[in-house]
Amino acid sequence: MPASKAQQKAVSKYMKQNYDEIKVRVKKGRKAEIKSHADAIGESVNNFIGRAIDETMQRDINTAPTDTNPILPSDTLKVAKSAAETSGETVPQYIKRAVSAQSERDTASLRIGLNPVTGEMILNNANNK
């Protein structure tokens, strides 16, 4: 039995409120290839495309070049790129490791009473009394 006009209207309203539509154009024959692949793995074309987008976006986040990272000055980024290449890491991996190592050095400096930036002794209130 076909859906009633009221059911069609309710579904249409729900779709408009909860989903955005994106039109994707592919070369002739590609649509059938995509559908065949999705069918073979037990997915709808929509789910397959959504998953492909999600996985690609996640991969891009994990491996995105940091050239567009506004946090690092360009000269710092240039040094990080060179060091990462030398160590065989991606720039994000190198930066993560470098920040972690520097944090450990700063903690050790503070523990022995040295300012990690200047290297000067830190005079605290307990020493001044």
Image (tube, helix red, strand yellow):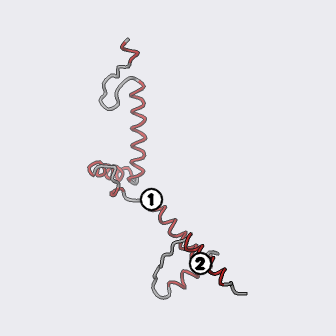
Where in the figure is residue 38, as x and y percent of width and height?
59, 77
Q: Which mark is residue 61?
A: 1
Tell whether 56 sits left or right of 122: right
Label 1: few (<14), some (14–19) or many (≥20) C-alpha neighbours in 10 Å = few
Q: Residue furthest top?
A: 129
Where in the figure is residue 63, as x and y percent of width and height?
43, 59
As displayed, is residue 8 above or below residue 102? below
Mark with earlier residue (1, 2): 2
Q: Look at the numbered disc 1 and give the secondary structure of its residue.
A: helix
Residue in view at x 38 percent, y 19 percent:
124
120 and 80: which is toward the camera:
120
Viewport quadrant of the C terminus: top left
Viewport quadrant of the N terminus: bottom right
Separation of marks 1 and 2 at Cα, in angstroms = 34 Å
Q: Which mark is residue 12?
A: 2
**Amino acid beneath label 2:** Ser
Label 2: few (<14), some (14–19) or many (≥20) C-alpha neighbours in 10 Å = few
Residue in view at x 65 percent, y 84 percent:
5
90 and 73: which is toward the camera:
73
Where in the figure is residue 22, as x and y percent of width and height?
48, 76
**Amino acid beneath label 1:** Ile
83 and 109: which is toward the camera:
109
